[in-house]
Image: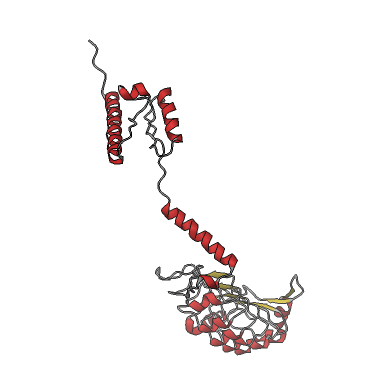
Amino acid sequence: MAKGKKKSSDSKGRKITLKTAKNSVKLTVDGKRRLDLSNMEITTFPKCILKLCDVDELDLSRNMLKKLPDSIDRFLNLRWLDLHSNQLEQLPEAIGRLPKLLSLNLCNNLLTTHGIPHELGLLRNLRTLNLGLNRIETLPSSIAALKELQQLGLFNNLLTSTPLWLHSLPNLQKLNIKCNPIRPDEPPELDPIRRVECLYLVREGCLCGECLQKCKEKRGQMDSRLTKGPVHGRTILAGLITPNSVAQDDQARRSRTPGVMNDMLVPGLGAPSGTYAASGNWHRRAAVEPGVLALVFAVTEAFDWCLVWAWLLLQALPPPPCL
């Protein structure tokens, strides 16, 4: 029987005395008083620390607390409250009556959506809120009232979506929603592109001179891109020798003569034989009708291409066997 009583007393956890609590008060770098009762196997909130309610920071992390009393609102000077790694399933409504609280760490507990009271939105000065590693399925809308919130941790929960108001918090800088079953069709982050809802059309007479000039320049650039035709360059086949001097001189003269079509030079072939080669021209120059001249140009150009393909075919054939 005594053994059973001992087991029952062990389940209550470690008992914190006022002397132990006073010895746990430390001074921070910025001169604030911190009551550090972390990792002491505490299962129930020690009432004796209410006599130290004038502290600025309270650390009850890494214990076995299952609930907080309503008397937590006596810590009116509290600016930093750390309750991570406990067994909290619900927060008291009194949590919203800590007007100076700047940081609240509730990570790694058993909190659900119903365990977060709406009074949490009364913490107007709260800047850091950590709700990661819990069982939260949906965010309470009261968090939207935390206008000074800068960092929000929601990682490793059961969130399937993020409310739109979450991204409209004016001072929010860091948002961690990793490891949540968020649907892929709903992006977890706010779309940075601002889409135009209204488009206003005005007449040219309503614009000032400078704006009208800019519009005309932009429109001219767009028109030039649309109407600009393809640039025809000279066709060069790699591996062939350069054209002879007669063909180069003839090409240079044609490029300087307005109204005469530039010839397409095929390096390595030079000028065609016969009458055109003797005169140094690739095409016959005759004062004929435009239709006849176009036909002559087409026939001669086709003939030149036949020579090119014949030369390439000869190059591709294997050499004759040696006798």
Q: What x and y, as percent, mark residue 295?
A: 27, 37
> In this rendering, does residue 211 appear at all?
yes
Instruction: Tell me if residue 66 can be seen.
Output: no
Q: Can you give x and y, in whole percent of width and height, for residue 46 in the image? A: 64, 84
Q: How many marks?
A: 0
Provide residue 213's location: percent of width, then percent of height: 56, 63
- Residue 219 vs 4, above or below: the answer is above
Is residue 265 rendered to the left or right of residue 291?
Answer: right
Q: Residue furthest top?
A: 323
Q: Is 273 on the left or on the right of 9, as rendered?
A: left
Q: Quadrant of the C terminus?
A: top left
Position of residue 254 measured from the top left corner of the image (x, y, whole percent): 42, 33
User: In the picture, residue 53 is in which quadrant?
Assistant: bottom right
69 relative to 179, above or below: below
Q: Nearer the viewer, residue 127 or 64?
A: 127
Identified at 53% across, 78% down, the residue is: 87
User: Is the residue 198 above or below the residue 122 in the image?
Assistant: above
Q: In the depicted view, which residue is nearer to us: 168 or 146?
A: 168
**Of residues 139 and 51, which is closer to you in this image?**
139
Relative horizontal placement of residue 132, taking residue 277 as reference (left or right): right
Tell which residue pokes out farthest to the right in this image.
31
Q: Is residue 163 above or below residue 266?
A: below
Instruction: Say which quarter of the image contains residue 277.
Output: top left
* Colour logic: secondary structure
